[in-house]
Image (tube, helix red, strand yellow):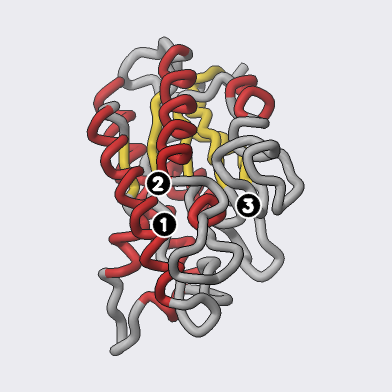
Amino acid sequence: MERSLSGQKKGGFENDTAVLKIVAFGNSITAVRSDVQRVFAQRLPGLLRNRGISAVVVNSGIGGSHSGRLMDNDKIKVNHGLDRLTSDVLRHNPDIVIIGFGHNDAYIDDNQPNGKSRISLDAFRSNLIYMITELQKKESKIILVTPSPIARPQRPSFQNSRLSKYAEVVRSLAVEYEVGLADNNKLFLEYRKNGENYTGLLTDGVHPNDDGHQMIAENLIIEIMKIVEDKY
């Protein structure tokens, strides 16, 4: 029978009896999409298999989800991050949880430079802290993910500027709570290929295409391997 890696000794990967259980928790950047062949969560098992690690990845991404609860902002009527932390994450007893929120939290619905975000910066920070502390009680390892940048003309530049502040909160929490960090915001902003920037990695100015998801997956593998090497 396959077992979670929790409590396994170093070297337990060699006979494939230990299985790394990962939950990818987030919004539509995480969720499976019809216009993408494989999102990053679907790419992780194969990339880990190439490194001799058996993994199961549970995709707990929901489009439109912010980090809080429906009562905090019901513009998108789905179960949001804190609404489903127990049902979509904790109940799986994961070894590693990838937490990726921010796009819907930061979004300014009235599309004005000084407008309110759906979830305030302080509330976003508090929501992530709650997730981190609950997961640490369960001894799950955590990788925080900064929200990838968005692009014009689909979104005006001030929406991206607001989003960058949420990315900075994620970075600061990764340091404060000593958890993993996959800095997708920085990764995309620094992307240059054939004279193009990160906008070529997006399907609609917001969501990554297959190339973008491959980059995200490879970036996450670096953080996952740090956890595996440190623990086992």
Q: Residue at x 53, y 69 (%)?
A: 206
**Could you tell which of marks 3 and 2 lies nearer the N-terminus?**
3
Amino acid type at mark 1: Ile
The answer to which image quadrant residue 39 occupies is: bottom right
Judged from the image, the secondary structure of the residue bearing numbered disc 1 is helix
CA–CA distance between discs 3 and 2? Answer: 14 Å
Q: Quadrant of the C terminus?
A: top left
> Residue 222 location, x and y as percent?
30, 45
Residues at circles 3 and 2 in contact by the CB criterion of under 8 Å = no
Q: Residue at x 34, y 54 (%)?
A: 165
What residue is pinned by disc 3? 31
Q: Residue at x 43, y 49 (%)?
A: 47
CA–CA distance between discs 3 and 1? Answer: 13 Å
Whether 126 is drawn above or below 65: the answer is: above
- Most extreme residue toward the front is 114
Residues at circles 2 and 1 in contact by the CB criterion of under 8 Å = yes
Q: Is residue 126 left or right of residue 231?
A: right
What residue is pinned by disc 1? 216
> Residue 6 location, x and y as percent?
45, 15
